[in-house]
Image (cartoon, helix red, strand yellow):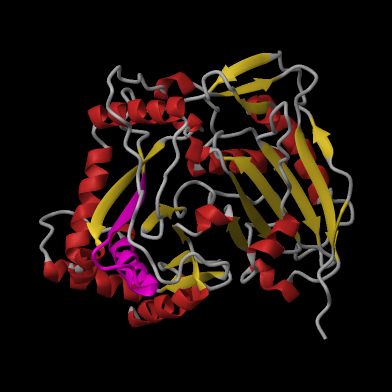
Amino acid sequence: MSIPLIVEKKLTEMVKPSKHIPLQTLSLSTLDNDPYNEVIYKACYVFKAKNVVDDDAELPESLLKKALSDLLVYYYPLSGILKRQDSDRKLQLSCGGDEGGVPFTVATENVELTSLNNLENIDSDTALKFLPELHVENYGYRPFALQVTKFGCGGFVLGMAMSHAMCDGYGEGHIMCALTELAGGKKPTLTPVWDRERLVGKPEDDDQPPFLPGGDTAASPYLPTDDWVTEKINIRADSIRRLKEATLKEYGFSNEVLTTFEVIGAYLWKSRVKALKLDRDGVTVLGLSVGIRDVVDPPLPDGYYGNAYIDMYVPLTVREVEESPISDIVNLIKEAKRKAHDKDYLQEELANTEKIIKMNLTIKGKKDGLFCLTDWRNIGIFGSMDFGWNEPVNIVPVVPSETARMVNMFMRPSRLEPDMVGGVQIVVTLPRIAMVKFKEEMKALE
């Protein structure tokens, strides 16, 4: 008989900066203001119990609470309140003074971490029990919150919630690593930099409508549906190597390096199109998140933690995706990445986003064929997070369901699976009936 999962949340406390922060109002960049970035993304960091129990050692929640208070001296905007203004549709951040703070929750769990397999195959609804909530009020909402859930075995889960408008994955990684350094008695390695004005676009005064991706894409017979399923799929290093070798045989790629993201991304697009049985004469759109930190002139400093990526889109008919070899799709992905690294294109993209914000536009039409890829392997969330409990044995990202249905995430495999070294873990959400075919395509890679 299985034991019911009971997470008992104690009172949430507002943790304030350990030093006084003057009251101030901050503006954000064009990329931060993109309506598609105003989502809350969350992650669970799973820590096993210490091998040696020290009765005099501080509890993780005490260490992390103190570290958070010190973190807010460096990253003081995290203690503020975000609100989108009605006048210009722009986000504004109020921080400092006596009202600042970050919600910090301590909870206890009635089962052992091992009985949950260190959250390895946990569903999103259950994962939410270990994650804090960010409530939206009339005055705005807090952009950052933490929760520590303690298990009887001595292990714990650190749950994080963050508004994507505040930072991208790279920035979030540096924030969590700084928290770890402070909890371990060190100062943050990186000095945070706000500088959001560096990525503010100038809207062009013309009548051209802005570009909106993914409207009226190919239809799937399986959509709409309420029966969605999320799976973590492991792709081993030797499968990736074989796919790269086969792709190189199809096309020379001169002296260019084939990346795992490119070849697996192309394979995932083909697999998803087949799994959803998209209308062959319709259009499917592949979206890629491409970092632009070095495109800005001069390059953004390492301590910049705002959004510093743009989305690139590759449209093809479903028939073209099905009939094209992997190498052709890899070529298109490479072209999109090259275009994203053009300084003039970045300015055009910022101007386009400013128009979207001003006109308050959203994607209309069918989005069945819109498919986005994002790479979480090297954005910083896998920097050191050892402040006395070793590195987390597992990291579980939880994104809003609407986003998850369109996005495949590249993750590093769990540390619990040593035979997956050099491989990649894909997190994918599909209608249950389509997932069966998708997994067959993934199995064919082996």
Residue drawn at x 18%, y 64% is: 327
Tell me where residue 48 appears, x and y as whole percent. 71, 64
Tell me where residue 140 appears, x and y as whole percent. 69, 29
Q: Is residue 415 magenta?
A: no
| Residue 429 shown left or right of residue 287 in the figure | right
Q: Which residues are magenta?
A: 263-289
Residue drawn at x 47%, y 72% is: 233
- The quarter of the image holding the N terminus is bottom right
Mark count: 0
Comparing 17 with 177, the one in front is 17
| Residue 337 shown left or right of residue 234 in the figure | left
| Residue 255 shown left or right of residue 65 in the figure | left
Check the image and report above or below for 13 versus 16. Answer: below
- The quarter of the image holding the C terminus is bottom left
Check the image and report above or below for 135 versus 257. Answer: above
Residue drawn at x 75%, y 69% is: 113
Residue drawn at x 54%, y 32% is: 190
Using the rendered view, name the quadrant where residue 274 is placed.
bottom left
Asked whether residue 154 appears in the rendered view, the answer is yes
Q: Is residue 274 magenta?
A: yes
Check the image and report above or below for 146 versus 327. Answer: above
Tell me where residue 40 appears, x and y as whole percent. 60, 44
Comparing 251 with 176, the one in front is 251
Tell me where residue 295 appears, x and y as whole percent. 30, 31
